[in-house]
Amino acid sequence: MTDSTVPRLSSLVDRLLSEDLPPFHQLYADDQAVLVLDSSAIVQPAPAGSTDRRAFLARASTLSLAIPGVGAALAACAPAGDADKAAAIRDSAGSRVVPLDNSNSRLDSAVLREEHHEGTSATAAATAGASQTAFRRFDPALPPLAPGNRLALNWHAREVPVRISKDTVVAAWTFEGDIPGPIVHCRVGDTVDFTLTNDVDIPHSMDFHAAQIDPKHAFRSVTKGQSVQFSFTPRFAGAFMYHCGTAPVLMHIGSGMYGAIVVSPREPLPPAKEFVIVQSEFYLAEAVNGVRAFDYAKMTAMLPDFVAFNGRPNQYMDAPIRVKVGDRVRFWVVSAGPTHPSHFHVVGEQFDTVYLGAPPGTPIRGVQTFTVPAGGGMVFELVCDVPGEFPFVNHGFGHGQKGAIGILVVEP
C-alpha cells in the first residue's frame, strides 16, 4: 500500500457524509487500513438526510480503524443517544445503561478538536449566577486521615461558575463544585470506594493516578444521570493527580476537572505542617456577561492566561500560609497541567528532603528547585529555622509571574 492510497480519517468522514454513500463494507474494500471486527459491526449508510458529523460519530464508533483507539475516541464524544453500540451496564437502580469508552488521549486534539462542544466550557450551568459567586480561598492544609482502612467518596460532576480572583469568574467543569476538586487523603493499603455521578449533559469520568486498575472499565465515561463505581487500593505513597479522562482530555482537565490524592505511607513520616499544592493553567476566552470560559484552541497553543496554585492565581500572596519557627513543613505538590510542569522553589530556603518516588524511600537532600512534570507529584520538606516571609514559586518565572506564587510566613 502506498502513502497515496492510505485512507485518512478526514477522507472517510467526507465519503460517509456524501450524498451517494455506498454501504460501508464497500468503502476501501481492498484496503487493509480499515478493519471490521465482526459482521455485526458493519455499518450501513445513514438514513436520508442524516449527514451531519454527529451521525458519523455514532456510526463510526463501532469500527476499529488502523489508527489505534479511534473507535473508542469517537464513542467517547458521541452524544448519549448515539452510544447504543457500546456494551450495556446497569445503573444503581438496575436499569440498562450505556457506558462510553474513553479514547487514547493522543487522538483527542487531532481527531476530536472540532467535535467537542465548540471548544468552550461556557454551558448554561457554568455561567449561571456568576455575578453572585464569591471568592473563596482554597485551604491548602492536608486533611486528616479518616478512621479505619476504607474511604468512601461519592462525588458529582458539576458545571458551576468559580471566582478565581476579585475580577475573574470562570465557567468551570468540576468535581464537587470547585477548582481543584477536594483533596483526598488515605494510606497505602487502604481501600478507596469511589462513585462519580454525572449531573450534566457532557459525559465525564474519573482517572486516579494512585490506582492500578483496568481503565477501560473503571475510568469509563458516564452521561447525565449515570454513575460509575469502582474501588482501588493504593500500593505506593506519594502525591498523585486525579482528573477527568473523557475525550478531549485536554478540554476536561483544562476546564477544571482535576485534583490531588495524597497517599501516606503506613509508617508515619516525621511530624510536620503539611500542605497540598496543585498547580494548573488557565486558558480563557474574553469575558461574556462577566464570565470567562475555558478555551480549547488556547489550550492547544499552550500559552496560559494564568498559572495558579490551588485554582486561584496569587491567592497565597494575599492570604499566606503561616507556620512557626522550628516547624517542619511538608509540601505535597501535584502538577495538574494540563500541559506545563512546576519548577517548585522556596525563596530563601532549601529543601532538606525531596522524595522522587514513594516516601520514605528515594529521598534526595539539599535541593533548591525540582521539577514536577505535568501529571506528576512529588513531596518537598524543609525545616523553618529562620523567621520571615518566604515566597514559594514556580521558578519558571514566566508562569510564576502569571500567578504560581505564594508566601510562607514563618512566625517567631
Image: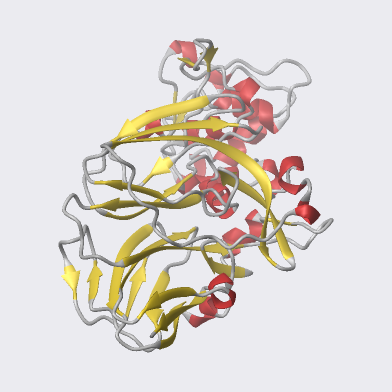
- Percent coordinates x, y for residue 369 in the rendering: 33, 79
Residue 264 vs 199, above or below: the answer is below
Task: Give the total number of marks visible in the rendering.
Answer: 0
Q: Quadrant of the C terminus?
A: bottom left
Answer with left or right where residue 313 lies relative to residue 31: right
Reply above or below: 308 against 103.
below
Indicate the colouring scheme.
secondary structure
What quarter of the picture does the N terminus occupy? top left
Relative depth, front residue between 178 and 342: 178
Return the residue nearer the eye: 224 or 78: 224
Check the image and name the residue furthest to the right.
289
Q: Does the rendering let one see residue 394?
A: no
Image spot of residue 71 (x, y percent): 49, 31
| Residue that appears at 54% across and 48% down | 257
Residue 40: x and y in percent read 47, 11
Taking the spot 48% from the left edge, 49% from the top edge, the residue there is 182
Residue 271: x %, y % from top left: 24, 65
Please give left or right for residue 183 compared with residue 365 in the image.
right
Q: Is residue 22 above or below residue 296?
A: above
Picture residue at 38% right of the left edge, 43% below the top: 208
Residue 295 visible at all: yes
Q: Is residue 273 left or right of residue 113?
A: left
Instruction: Between residue 46 and residue 326, name the one nearer to us.
Output: 326
